[in-house]
Structures are given as structure tokens and as C-alpha cells.
Amino acid sequence: MELSVFNSKGEDTGRKVTLPESVFGIEPNEHAMYLDVKQYLANQRQGTHKSKERAEVAGSTKKIKRQKGTGGARAGSMKSPVFVGGGRVFGPKPRNYSFKLNKKLKSLARLSALSQLAKDERLVLVDNITIDTPKTKTFAAILQGLKVGERKTLIVTKEADTNVVLSSRNLSKVKVATPGALTTYDLLNADKVVCLEASLSVFEEIYTSK
């Protein structure tokens, strides 16, 4: 598959680049992507939820009324779940939601997401993005030039660029990452992925060297 290369102003440079088939041309595996996204979201959960059961609620354990003859159900303590202020039955407890996935499956999921991006024409190739001093206005103008300003956008740089990261930090719909730090969730969650031309070689290096 060939993609046109744009400059940071959104102008077509007239050049076209052939995307590596081993990274952007495989048949997407939906189940692998599902599992990888599920693991990512599970890992974001703190798992610190907790409610008190009847043994943990503060209150008297005195029997509040006699066992028989009242016409009502028997009750032994105000801490019973049937009373207001009592403990909760089978309430949430702290737990770890994370689970393991094999490295090969995670790699397949990312390749599938990249291939899906190319297939859906959500990938934009840019020759370079250069920002001399961190400035949100400058970065927002670049996104407007590329016609992705109002969408959830993922910017993929070859290596960490402090000025680009700082310039994008105040834009809620923009995320900047390097190829090695990308997750399947990031790739699928973005409406558009702006990829620097130099980062294509890094993708090949990461996924074809294994």
C-alpha cells in the first residue's frame, strides 16, 4: 500500500511511500485486538473498591428485640444488612484486575491494529514535525493544516521529542507516542494517526526483527 507524504502545513509533497507489508499489510486479528485492549483497560483499574460487611460495621451487637412473639422477623443485631446502616451483603473487595497475555499475541494485536488503520485510511504520513519552542498554538496550527484538529489524534514520532510533547499536552484529544510505546488501545481509539515518515523504519525494526 502506498501513502502520500504531507508536510507539517498539510501540503502534499508529491512523494509517495510504500508501507511495509509485514507491519501494515497483515490480515487483522480481531480477537487478538480485543484481548489486548481488554488487558490494557483492566490494568487501568485500581481495584481499591471496598464496602463494609456486618462484621466491620460499627454498632451494638445487642439483640434489639425478643426472638418470638413480636409478629415480625427475628433480628439479632442492628448491624444486620436488612437495617439502614447495617453491613452490605457480598460487597466489593479490593482485587487485582490484571491478567497475563503472551508476547506474541500482544505483538499480533498491535500489527493487526496498524494494518486496520491503513485499511480504514486513518493513517496520515508526514515528512517531519519541527517545533523550536513548546507552544500549543503552533502545534494546534499544524493539526489544523493536516485537517485533524477536531478529532482524537495520535502522533507517532521516531523518538521522544520534548517540544512536541509539551506543545500537545494541553490538547485533550491529542496523544504523542513513539512506536515502541504504542498500545493497541491507543491505535484503535484514535480517529486519525499522524505518523512521521522516519518512524516507519522503527516499526519494521521492532516487529520484523523478532
Image (cartoon, rainbow, N blue to C red):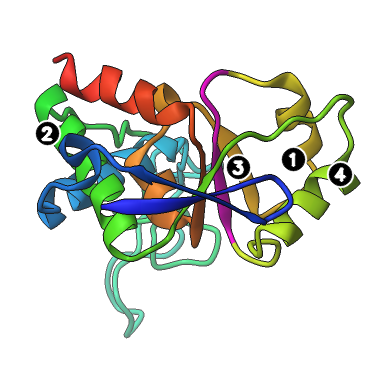
Q: Residue at x 39, y 39 (%)?
A: 55
Q: Which badge, 2 or 4, comes first in the chain's sequence?
A: 2
Q: What residue type is labelled 1?
A: Ser
Residue 77 is at least partly visible in this image: no
- Image spot of residue 66 (x, y percent): 36, 65
The image quadrant where one finds the C terminus is top left
- For the residue pair 83 and 37, the one nearer the viewer reads as 37
Q: Determine crowd level at label 1: few under 14, some 14-19, many 20+ residues with C-alpha closer than 10 A.
A: many
The disc labelled 2 sits on which kind of residue?
A: Leu
The secondary structure type at the circle numbered 3 is strand
Mark found first going from the N terminus, 3 or 1: 1
Q: Which of marks 3 and 4 is nearer the N terminus?
A: 4
Question: Which residue is label 4 attached to?
Answer: 138
> Is-magenta flag for residue 132?
no
Q: Which residue in the protein does label 3 denote? A: 175
Position of 71 compared to 9: left or right? left
